[in-house]
Image (spheres, helix red, strand yellow):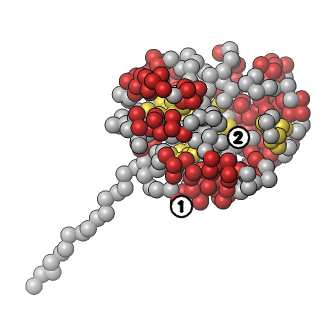
Amino acid sequence: MGTVSLPTMTTPAPTPPLLLRALQGETLDRPPVWFMRQAGRYLPEYRALRAQAPDFIAFCLNPDMAAEATLQPMRRFGFDAAIIFADILLIPRALGQEVWFEAGEGPRLGRMPEPDQMASLAASAGEHLSAVGGSLSRVRAALEPERALIGFCGAPWTVATYMLDGEARTIGKGERAQARTYAYADPRRVAATLEVLVEASAHYLKMQADAGAQVLKIFESWAEGLPDDLFETLVLRPHQALVRRVRELGVTTPLIGFPRGSAALAERYAQEVEVDAVALDTACPLEVGRRVQAIKPIQGALDPLLLRAGGEALDRRVDQLVEAWGQGPWIFNLGHGILPDVPIAHVERVLTRIGAQ
């Protein structure tokens, strides 16, 4: 008698998280949603957790605390993605520059070491910041498989503005005019600093991918106000170099670039930087967003101030964004970070409006 072969039972492959599907260029029934700074002071549970840490840097580098901060908004709102709780100014610490935070004042940095000194430390940046990898591993283990995990770094120019200023403290909140003078007055030092930051950031992002990050984001918070020649020197070329170096290190994780304040130059950024998606800021016109979306997936761009204000104006703008960008690959987000005094009910209102809750 011949043997009877039984049909092989196969387990269907799990559906990728919505965020990853959007980054692959898929247009979805609703956009995946997460908010920049979604783990933060607007949440009472975050404030209680933060009070247990001696200082902000210690908070970021405590894997248990940082993982808990990352997971808090996921439990409360069920966002489609978590972004690891950390800070863009961890990189200067890894390069030997003193960094601390003063209550009510924000970050403070000591004198920046010379670029050649920092260059010797760049390749070990990921190892130096392995605590962030510990946070990522903890979050990935706790997060549902349908929700994506995002790692990030500050872009070279944005981080350099803080580093170059150092002890001078001439850069006030929301003001980067002084930083641009470095690019004009000492272009060689700026170029050398950016080169070090590209190398350090690439190793940092690789460590995060190895630790479980499924998406990596490059935060260029200070692309605004740059004439096109400086935009090319300070934003485009360093981003191109960073993406290239990350790929050379074997990282295949999707990358989101965020050239905040780039305005019409966002289209050029999308064409010339090999990221998988471009995050748009609050001031980006809907039509510019559509043109960028024709090149690659986009993310953005609800005004954080409108999220705080709430009401019918918030509903109208959410609807406008859905109408303008919902017919292509798009991730719903803010145009910048959520504000500390945003009412929780307003976040819930947006999620309900777009069908994510």
- Figure check: 93 above or below 29: below
User: Which percent across, then down, holds residue 29?
Assistant: 33, 37
- Using the rendered image of the protein, determine whether residue 273 is visible from the camera's viewpoint: no
Lower sequence index among marks 1 and 2: 2
Residue at the outermost left position: 1
Res 190 → quadrant: top right
Between residue 87 and residue 35, name the one nearer to us.
35
- Figure check: 62 above or below 292: below
Q: Which mark is residue 95?
A: none
Between residue 157 and residue 233, name the one nearer to us.
157
Looking at the rendered image, the quarter that the C terminus falls into is top left
Res 112 → quadrant: top right
Looking at the rendered image, the quarter that the N terminus falls into is bottom left
Q: Residue at x 38, y 38 (%)?
A: 355
Secondary element at tag 1: helix
Between residue 96 and residue 304, name the one nearer to us.
304
Dot 2 amino acid type: Ile
Left or right position of 45 against 355: right
Answer few, some or many: residues within 10 Å of disc 2's Cα (few below 14, many 20 plus, some between 14 and 19).
some
Q: CA distance from mark 1 to mark 2?
A: 24 Å
Secondary element at tag 2: loop
Dot 1 amino acid type: Ala
**According to the image, label 2 marks what residue?**
88
Q: Residue at x 84, y 19 (%)?
A: 185
- Using the rendered image of the protein, determine whether residue 69 is visible from the camera's viewpoint: yes
Q: Residue at x 85, y 25 (%)?
A: 170
User: Which percent across, then down, holds residue 263?
Assistant: 58, 18
Q: Residue at x 45, y 55 (%)?
A: 145
User: Which percent across, then down, holds residue 288?
Assistant: 49, 18
Answer few, some or many: residues within 10 Å of disc 1's Cα (few below 14, many 20 plus, some between 14 and 19).
few
**According to the image, label 1 marks what residue?**
141
